[in-house]
């Protein structure tokens, strides 16, 4: 009786702890829903739109380090009084973090007029946040030029197969196979390098503003079509002048609902037709806390409904946002965002090779030969041009001498 009670109690105690059981099944399907593919250019604003940016944001040449360094002037005329007001507004801005371009609270909170040490990134971020969304989209890269060539399962596709959305860090982003606007989700019937999606991106590097970005390339996110991507938190970097191949393995995760320890839930759809996710929940929780404590929300993230955008030039509001971030770091139980009961993840295998290797090989040959001639013979391009000029001059003078010395025959 004693052994029976002991083992029965031990079993029941383990049972009511609801231990997690992992069940793995590997299935081979002939047809699968193709995932959505989102690409963003690392350069969020085109240099040709810089003049429009400087004028629209109300920053004058002497007030904006961005416009000053890049020698951009506004065509419109402004009087001295308006110039003085804009300059004071800019000087009253708090410093921004150079690594994230987000506003950070100054160390000395007692001083409401923080001296503004204007770097290019700080000046840009302050003015960029205040612009209307339509203007930001207009100044960013456009899908018609960004997607140079597109092919899916051997069939051509174009910019009409992409949907556009905007982010603070990357500007315009474009999603293939989003399932939005009434379009059907595409399906993959074969695998291998000759199937799937083939994209040739035009990064428009001549439009880059290198004072605002240190990278040349694109951000790529592969995600389910019903999930809105977050380029700031996920994705891989695609480098320029490389051909990148990505193989995908789809993983479907099904978690047990309470009382099992995962405590998963089924997230509903948001107002835009996408599935609400854990990351979206955490971000919205931060925004809601900011709205409650600061009476405004972070403008660098999507704003929830009935919320007010914080002014990154207001020291009090910026410090309040930092206090909310610190509160979330110290107390993990403020935002309750459990894992989803059903989730699709993609495991990626990435490989790259040089784009247009023949062109690069010819450049390497000339570069190597030029280096050898310069190092061992002291010959440069200017020296070769000088030799060529000397030879041409000698030949020209010799021909001229021959013409002057030739006899002239007179026929009777």
Image: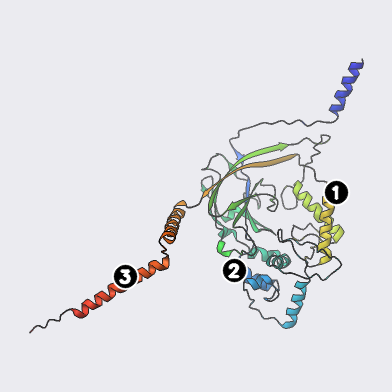
- Note whether residue 217 is visible: yes
Whole-Å distance between the Cαs marked 1 and 2?
46 Å
Number of the front mark, 2 or 3: 3
Residue 248 percent location from the top left of the image: 61, 41
**Which residue is labeled 1 in the image?**
331
Residue 15 percent location from the top left of the image: 84, 27
Element type at mark 2: helix
- In which quadrant of the rendered view does residue 412 lie? bottom left
Element type at mark 3: helix
Q: Quarter holding the N terminus?
A: top right
Residue 225 percent location from the top left of the image: 66, 47
Badge 1: few (under 14), some or many (20 or more) residues near its Cα, within 10 Å? few
Badge 2: few (under 14), some or many (20 or more) residues near its Cα, within 10 Å? some
The label shown at residue 391 is 3
* Along the line of sight, the residue nearer the viewer: 269 or 104: 104
Whole-Å distance between the Cαs marked 2 and 3?
46 Å
**Which residue is labeled 2 in the image?**
48
Element type at mark 1: loop
Number of the front mark, 1 or 2: 1
């Amino acid at each position: 009786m004693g052994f029976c009670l002991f083992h029965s109690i031990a079993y029941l105690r383990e049972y009511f702890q609801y231990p997690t059981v992992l069940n793995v099944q590997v299935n081979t399907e002939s047809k699968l829903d193709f995932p959505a593919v989102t690409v963003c250019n690392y350069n969020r604003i085109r240099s040709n739109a810089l003049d429009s940016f400087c004028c629209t944001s109300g920053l004058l040449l002497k007030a904006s380090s961005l416009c000053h360094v890049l020698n951009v002037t506004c065509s419109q005329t402004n009087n001295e009084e308006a110039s003085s007001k804009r300059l004071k507004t800019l000087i009253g801005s708090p410093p921004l973090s150079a690594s994230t371009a987000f506003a950070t609270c100054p160390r000395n909170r007692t001083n409401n007029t923080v001296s503004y040490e204007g770097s290019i990134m700080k000046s840009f971020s302050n003015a960029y946040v205040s612009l209307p969304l339509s203007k930001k989209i207009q100044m960013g890269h456009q899908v018609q030029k960004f997607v140079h060539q597109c092919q899916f399962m051997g069939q051509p596709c174009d910019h009409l197969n992409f949907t556009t959305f905007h982010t603070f860090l990357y500007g315009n982003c474009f999603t293939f196979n989003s399932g939005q606007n009434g379009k059907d989700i595409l399906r993959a019937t074969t695998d291998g390098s000759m199937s799937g999606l083939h994209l040739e991106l035009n990064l428009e590097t001549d439009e880059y503003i290198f004072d605002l970005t240190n990278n040349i390339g694109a951000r790529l996110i592969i995600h389910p079509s019903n999930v809105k991507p977050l380029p700031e938190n996920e994705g891989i970097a695609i480098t320029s002048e490389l051909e990148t191949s990505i193989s995908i393995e789809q993983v479907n995760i099904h978690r047990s609902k309470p009382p099992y320890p995962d405590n998963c839930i089924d997230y509903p759809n948001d107002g835009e037709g996408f599935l609400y996710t854990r990351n979206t929940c955490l971000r919205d929780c931060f925004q809601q806390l900011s709205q409650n404590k600061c009476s405004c929300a972070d403008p660098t993230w999507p704003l929830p409904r009935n919320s007010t955008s914080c002014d990154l030039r207001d020291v009090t509001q910026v410090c309040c946002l930092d206090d909310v971030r610190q509160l979330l770091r110290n107390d993990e139980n403020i935002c309750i965002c459990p894992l989803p009961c059903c989730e699709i993840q993609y495991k990626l295998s990435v490989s790259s090779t040089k784009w247009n290797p023949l062109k690069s090989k010819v450049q390497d040959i000339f570069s190597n030969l030029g280096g050898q001639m310069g190092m061992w013979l002291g010959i440069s391009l200017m020296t070769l041009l000088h030799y060529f000029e000397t030879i041409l001059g000698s030949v020209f003078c010799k021909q001229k001498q021959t013409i002057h010395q030739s006899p002239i025959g007179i026929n009777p």
